[in-house]
Amino acid sequence: MRRRYLLRFYLAGTVAARAGDEMSGPALMLAGFALAGSTVEASSLLAGITLSAAVGGPVLGVLLDRAGRPGRLLAGALVLYAAGLAVILVGLGRLPFTVTLLVAGVTGLLGPALSGGWTAQLPRVVPGDRLPRANALDAMTFSLASLVGPALAGGVAEVLGAPTAVVVSVVLISSALPAAWTLPARPGRAPGVPAASVVSDLAAGMRVIAGRPPLARATLSSVVSCVAQGMLTACLPLLGDRVLGGAGRGAVLLSCTAVSALVANAVLSRFPRALPPDTVIWAGALVQAAALALAAVGSPLALVVAVLVAGIGEGPQLAALFDVRHRETPDHLRGQIFTTGASLKITGFALGAAAAGPLATWSLPGTLALAASAAVLAAVAFFAIPSATSE
């Protein structure tokens, strides 16, 4: 008799994979600076491995949806991602930087496997009545990873050196392989039903995202929220320097956001049906807007409270987004829609961070006010799409 796959095994795998992913970016930046001696090259590595994830998500999702054992494909993606990180580390200072950057871009294509690729498998791990609580717990793994990953990267780099931090991230990602490999199989395709082409599946997934108002609203609102989150992240070093007396203290602020998101989702997991997920998505955007406006005040206390409030908005919003996706997505397109959603969110975050960088040097309060406006726009965007649907 086949042993039942346990939710805690899934959660252990996602924590390991996502913590390794969150660790890999800062670790690559530190290793790039230590081995190549250039801040430009270090930041280029991070940009390369992050932005290419936006391209790889939809195709990776289609492949997961077409696989009879998606967990094994997911495990393969983890192996290739970890191998890519190792090649980047070996290549720094030894290979031409353009080659190393190309490897980073190819590796980043698999990034959505560590986010949406896992979450898409959740309905086969838990029964439908337990899915809301499982969504909240799954969202907690993102917050935990974003808290542990960067801190671990900095700590290991400080004690053992930046290259070792990359090695530890590779080990963490690799440790998730058993949990991925043994994920439950997908029910077989009905006899006589032909397999669609990859292009057809991509088009079908996009039609579902655009054609189901609840899913379209949740996707649009979450992506615009990520623009605001990217702007805040880009402002944190300057906020740390001007408000708290040190640029490095901006990373501590990011940890505060992760902690409050983790706590908020822990509470949500105890009361998974307290609020409809659709409501949580737009309300979470408004909470983040209030936090960003408070951060613009400029006092240390207001800033710490602001980042804590931001996490209270971000954590439940992510769990609610997962809930809406699971509810609205056909099973045969689940992987694509989750990885495409992850790609869109990564793109929104990157655009927000890129825009806020130069703006913050001109006016930090003005940039934070603009980020707050973006968060308000995320709530407005939710209601801009009519809720009525004709099935």
Image (cartoon, helix red, strand yellow):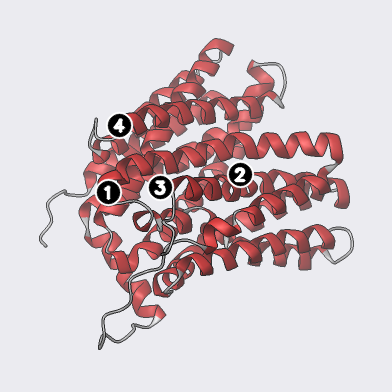
Which quarter of the rendered picture does the C terminus lie within?
bottom left
**Which of the 4 image quarters holds residue 263?**
top left
Q: Residues within 10 Å of mark 1 (few under 14, many from 20)?
A: many
Q: CA distance from mark 2 to mark 3?
A: 22 Å
Q: CA distance from mark 4 to mark 1?
A: 13 Å
Residue under pointer 3 = 223
Residue under pointer 4 = 283
Image coordinates of residue 162 in percent, x first then y, are 82, 44
Q: Earlier in the sequence, mark 3 or mark 1?
A: 1
Q: Mark 3: which amino acid?
A: Val
Q: Mark 2: which amino acid?
A: Ala
Image coordinates of residue 203 in percent, x first then y, are 33, 73
Q: Is residue 309 above or below residue 389?
A: above
Q: Is residue 150 above or below residue 363?
A: below
Circles 2, 3 touching at the beta carbon (< 8 Å): no
Q: Mark 4: which amino acid?
A: Ala
Which quarter of the rendered picture does the N terminus lie within?
bottom left
Please say whether residue 362 is visible from this viewpoint: no
Q: CA distance from mark 3 to mark 1?
A: 10 Å
Residue under pointer 1 = 217
Q: Earlier in the sequence, mark 2 or mark 4?
A: 2
Left or right for 275, reference 83: left
Image coordinates of residue 291 in percent, x first then y, are 44, 23
Q: Is residue 264 above or below residue 343?
A: above
